[in-house]
Structure formats: C-alpha cells, structure tokens
Image (tube, rainbow, N blue to C red):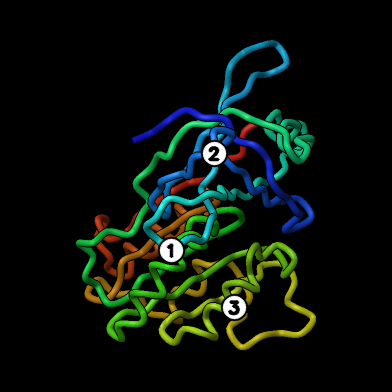
Amino acid sequence: MAEHFSLRLADSHMLAPTVRHLAFERADGKPLAFIPGQFLQIHFHYDDGTATKRSYSVATVGDGGSPVQRIEIAVSYVDGGAATKLLSELAIGGTIEASGPYGRFCLQDSDTHPRYLLLATGTGVTPYRAMLPQFEKLVARGDREVVLLYGARNETELLYGEEFEAFAQAHPGFTFYGCLSRQPRAVPRAHDRAGHVQSVLAEIAPSAERDIAYLCGNPNMVDAAFNALKEFGLPIPQIRREKYISSR
C-alpha cells in the first residue's frame, strides 16, 4: 500500500555524464516495502508554487522480497527541468517528499514461460537491477532463462552495465547484451551488439511458446519493440510495458 514519507539523501554519484544515482533513507527510519519493478513519486513545487511530481523506479538490489533501508533511484538530467534542479542540487542529508510504492511492472508468480526477454534504454534498466535477486533464484532452477537487451548510445551510458556483466558471468542462464547505437566500445565484448535493442530481437528469435517480454524506457523503443514482438507472434498479454517520459 502506498505511503507518503520524507526521504533523506544518504549517498550519490554520477552513473553517466547526465545520470545520477541517488541513495535515500526514510527520514522516519522505517524500511521501504516494495516489489521489484515498482516506482516512487517525488513531490515538489515549481518556482511559481504549483505542486508537481515525478516518478522513479526503485533500483535497490535487496533479497527480492524484504523491505529495504536504502532506496536507490537513477535520475536523468533534463536541461531546464524542475526535477533536475531539485535533485542535482540536493546535498547529502537533504530531504525531499515522496510517496509509493506504485506500479505493476513486476514479475508474476503465474508466469510459466521458460524465458524472460527484458528490453531497456536509459534509466529504464533500473527495475531490472532491482529484480536481479529474483532472476538469480529463477535461473538457479535450471529451467528458466533471462535475456537483457540494454540500449545506449555508447558504453558510458550503459547504466549499471558492469553489474549486469558480472551477474551474467556468475549466473548461467542470464545473458546481457549491450546494444550500442552510436559508438562501439574501445574494447568490444562478446555480447555487445551494434544498433538499437529491437534490431537484436531477430537474433534471439522470440516466440509465443517460450517468452514473456518486459519493455522499459524510451517510448519510441517501447513502441517499436512492442510491434516487433507482435510480429514474432507474442500475444499482447505476454508483453509488459513501462514508458519513461522526460518532463520539464
């Protein structure tokens, strides 16, 4: 059930030239109960006093089921954006107002298909980071696979890319593709691919019998991948979508 609470900034660092990772704790000291894939809303006011809010997926890697003390999000900076101003200027110890968790972009116990296809661009990869403990349990059973296709312009924009690479190396059954649309890595890796995430789908041959798909990030990517997956024969109930729209 959603709550309203204050968050105090405990730590932060830049993930990419225009993306900041922020780690909060609730000011009341309570943990946050959430399901990986859910998001929070940050509440604030424009300069004219008008109330507004922005949504951010929880990126915290916990155990996949228990409340967490650290509430982590990734924030893309938008030129002239009100939320950018608020969160880029927030100092350690500073507080903001929030509510949540919200959303149903989560893994479901009723899913029985043998493979998860995860597609993301930008900060749309954050819910998949929170899901890693769940994926660890799924692939350990030996009858499930997880494939993450993550699109960025270059390697500096692959948020949490090293974490996903390390997870893939440690967990057979989890595959991570870095899909670079503008510039390849200086030292290419085996699962790097050139182009946008939806252009890599043909290589992994989606099928209605095998796959449940999750799409998160830029609306253009989500729409293009949704249409491509339908052409591969996936019915709409097997394609779950969450669009990230930049707001000023």
Percent position (x, y) of residue 115? 32, 75
* The C terminus lies in quadrant: top right
**Amino acid carrying mark 2 in the image:** Gly
Element under disc 3: helix
User: Disc 1 or 3, which lies upstream in sequence?
Assistant: 1
Q: Is residue 39 above or below residue 15?
A: above
User: Which residue shows up at 38% across the image and 51% down it?
Assistant: 35
* The N terminus lies in quadrant: top left
- Most foreground residue, 47 or 211: 47
Q: Are marks 1 and 3 in contact (CB under 8 Å)?
A: no
Element under disc 2: loop
Percent position (x, y) of residue 42? 57, 32
Q: Is residue 146 above or below residue 187?
A: above
- Most foreground residue, 207 or 114: 114
Residue 71 placement, left or right of 222? right
CA distance for labels 3 and 2: 33 Å
Q: Which residue is mark 1?
A: 63
User: Disc 1 or 2, which lies upstream in sequence?
Assistant: 2
Q: Which mark is residue 29?
A: 2
Q: Which residue is mark 3?
A: 165
User: Which residue shows up at 36% across the image and 74% down it?
Assistant: 137
User: Which residue shows up at 27% across the image and 77% down it?
Assistant: 114
**Amino acid carrying mark 3 in the image:** Glu
